[in-house]
Amino acid sequence: MRDVTGETLIGTASRVEVTHGVLQRLADMCGADLLHVKGPAVSPELLEHRIVDGKRTVIPRGSTDADVLVRPDHLTQFESILAKHGWRKVASFNDGSAFGHAANYWHDLLGYVDVHRQFPGIDIAPSQAFQALWTRRQRIDIAHTLIHTPSVTDQRLILLLHAARSGTTNHPDKVRCWDNADNQERRAVRALARDLDAQVALAAAIGELDQFRGHRTYDLWRHFSTGDPSRLHEWRARVRAAPTRKDAVKVALNALALNRPHLRMDLGHDLSRVDVARGYWNRTLKASQEVYQVAREQARTQLRSRRRKGHR
């Protein structure tokens, strides 16, 4: 069985483990604090267990790339050492996602790594959040390298916040980290979410988002947790989620620009002028179609409303 890169799943798992080990050694070289999240860094108690040959066996969490969270104050030195050791940035923080949380790097031998400066859903200051996670960190061995991971409770919350962006209400991480958790574990996660200002995202993961209907990030988490495919809805939610008016203006302006790094990754080669022109054309066409659909639905709603009033 092979993954999207053509590797066997066993080969992919080994490569990702080696990548985590290499990233930790680079962090040690430059003095950067690094927390490894998801993939092979997840604690066994948060993973799937099956009976294999009569024995209870831990099933590793599938991953095709590595994810690390860097202390924000150490980000510059860590990115610098990545560049010196064959890593190429293919998507900046601003290009990576609606949350601007991670930059994406590529290495010809090791593949992709997402370098996080914050984790989506945690809304206290990134430096403060990292320090809270770092204080409770634990050490494990991956690829013959001692790495740092968040505590089990911190991991449980992080995986739930990740599940909140999955577009499904029954994500495996949500099932394992919440549905299968006992009351004490759930209380600990809720308390942690309060401390990290992550209550809205947690609510999106566990089906309680309606409790935060008036929150500025409500529409954004509803968009991602329900799998809404509309880019128009996404950008409108991103504008509403912006903490200041200045940030909202920046988001609105970014909505007009073509995400060239993502297009480059989709096409698998450097962009030509034709690629850029085609990208803008496709973007404009999709936006126009969505605006037309929204306008048509609004017109239908108004027509139904007038008809109801006419029957009174």
Image: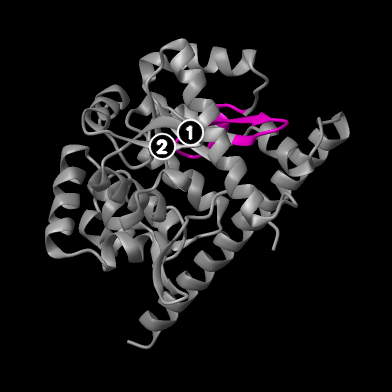
Q: Tell me which segment is drawn in magenta.
A: 91-112
Disc 2 marks which amino acid? Answer: Asp
Q: Which residue is mark 1?
A: 144
Q: Position of residue 272 (x, y in %)?
A: 86, 30
Left or right placement of residue 66 versus residue 118 in this view: right
Q: Residues within 10 Å of mark 1 (few under 14, many from 20)?
A: few
Q: Position of residue 160 (x, y in %)?
A: 34, 53
Q: In what quadrant of the picture does the N terminus appear?
A: bottom right
Say if 247 sits above or below 230 in the image. Answer: above
Q: Residues within 10 Å of mark 2 (few under 14, many from 20)?
A: few
Q: Which residue is mark 2?
A: 141
In contact (CB < 8 Å): disc 1 and disc 2? yes
Say if 258 sits above or below 178 in the image. Answer: above
Disc 1 marks which amino acid? Answer: His
Q: Residue at x 74, y 39 (%)?
A: 280
Q: Position of residue 240 (x, y in %)?
A: 38, 41
Circle 2: element type: strand
Q: Residue at x 26, y 41 (%)?
A: 151
Circle 1: element type: loop
Q: Which mark is residue 154?
A: none
